[in-house]
Amino acid sequence: MDITKLTVHELQEKLSKKEISITNITKAYVENIEKHEKDVQAFITPLSKEALEKAKELEAKVESGEISGSLAGIPIGIKDNICTKGIRTTCASKMLENFISPYDATVMEKVNSENMINLGKLNMDEFAMGASTEYSYFQKTRNPWNLKSVPGGSSGGSAAAVAANMVPWALGSDTGGSIRQPASFCGVVGLKPTYGLVSRYGLVAFASSLDQIGPITKDVKDSAILLNVITGHDEKDTTSINTEKIDYTKALKNDVKGLKIGIPKEYFGEGIKPEVKQSLEKAIETYKKLGATVEEFSLDIADYALATYYIIACAEASSNLGRFDGIRYGYRTENYTNLKDIYRNSRSEGFGAEVKRRIILGTYVLSSGYYDAYYKKAQQVRTLVKKEFDKAFEKYDVLLTPTSPTVAFELGTRSNNPLEMYLADICTVSVNIAGLPGISIPCGVDSNGMPIGMQLIGNKFKEETILNAAYTYEQETKFRENYEPTFKGGAC
């Protein structure tokens, strides 16, 4: 039995039956990290030694009855823009290369309260700005399905680590698709919750009105389990919504009879690769066979979503990243003679090219004379996007689209072409603009054996609906039983 191939709910079952121990689980994952990390490069700060020590400590406490809980001793990986007390939180940037967080993010407090074991901080695009995890200051993460391909981004380290069985599940963050797109590229499940359902306190901000923390897992049930852990109102986050606590695992009924699924035709047009479209069409037929009602419709505003997203996201990024000035914390240049030099040189040397590009664009759209023409207009279009989705959900329970128009592309093929890289987000950004929940699940592979992702979008706070729709499809098609990463291609 390969412990690392088990889902979390399978690990829980074996732990409860005493078929395996907490130490067995942690050791198996540490060994898999040692085996694959040199090729995949998913970790910025691995915590293997600390994890093994924690496993022994927790095992003793569980045996003595000092602690209990079904998630005690379950390992997890954490995207490196989520603050972890006493551990580096770098955001994959030179700017925060040596930053040790003095506090835990709220989601980390929740993870720690369940006595999970942190296996390490995972690689990402710098400050979550990118769609391939090639914009990390430290390293380029590779896709376990083909080591010459990207894992997606910005949560590429999280998705690659789950796909490579180096962690059983992980936390990522999603600003415009940064959980769902890498989940699609790596053949795993990625859930972006409704904005405000999960506290953003302790998440280093990229675009505050768009960012949301969520789970990346091996299957849908694990997503529901981890969502149960991280949701809840938080007084430290003013955007946190106070809703009743839900057990999302109870929504997994394996039944979609009567479910109304809308297919926005704009998401299946120009730019969608034929094999991606074919897989989605096959998935649509599966839903029909399972008793769902499927109908095509027009979501007109989708054509404007990408431009709207990049104006809003870059504007908020330019504001949020203003705090990194070389004075209070973070990287400080050694090359200065006055205060202006410190500001200029610290930011010039500390930020990578993609982050600088977005700061410049964001500063431009917020500047005098351009604010009304760009930022204000983008916010007005954002309202129209929300209204279009509201109208769609009057008729449909779930919207079904591709997660990405393509499968994972080769390393280096888009990193020097920002516009082409930005198009990788075309299917996912509207969900963040409208603050909706979305989930990506694998729905097949292309002729080269690379995973294809399907996105299910729900109305606000309807995570139960999309989780059940995803779970029912997953149970019918059993992707994990038929496909797994091959680590082909060798390191580039």
Image (spheres, rainbow, N blue to C red):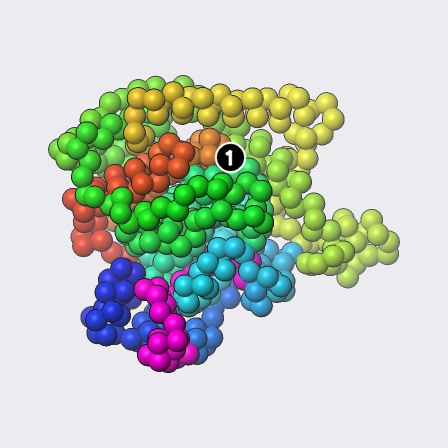
Q: Is residue 245 above or below residue 271?
A: below
Q: In the image, is residue 116 part of the stretch drawn in magenta?
A: no
The x and y percentages for residue 273 are 31, 34
Q: Residue furthest right?
A: 338
Name which residue lies at 52% across and 26% down: 382
What segment carries the magenta color? 55-84
Name which residue lies at 42% across and 67% down: 115
Can residue 450 be seen at all in this image of the molecule?
Answer: no
**Quadrant location of the N terminus in the rendered image:** bottom left
Q: Is residue 390 above or below residue 181?
A: above
Q: Is residue 238 above or below residue 491?
A: above
The x and y percentages for residue 325 are 73, 51
How many marks overall?
Answer: 1
The x and y percentages for residue 271 are 37, 30
Q: Give neighbour class at mark 1: few <14, some 14-19, many 20+ (Cα, 10 Å).
A: few
Name which residue lies at 62% across and 63% down: 102
**Quadrant location of the C terminus in the rendered image:** bottom left
> 28 or 110, which is in the foreground?
110
Q: In the image, is residue 71 part of the stretch drawn in magenta?
A: yes
Is 448 left, or right, of 134 in this rendering?
A: left
Q: Is residue 402 above or below residue 96?
A: above
> 11 or 417, which is in the foreground?
11
At mark 1, the secondary structure is: helix
Is 218 left, or right, of 359 in this rendering?
A: left
**Residue identifier under label 1:** 419
Image quadrant where residue 252 sits: top left
The x and y percentages for residue 438 are 37, 38
Image quadrant where residue 379 sits: top right
Label 1 is placed on what type of residue?
Answer: Leu
Name which residue lies at 52% across and 32% down: 309
Can residue 317 be seen at all in this image of the molecule?
Answer: yes
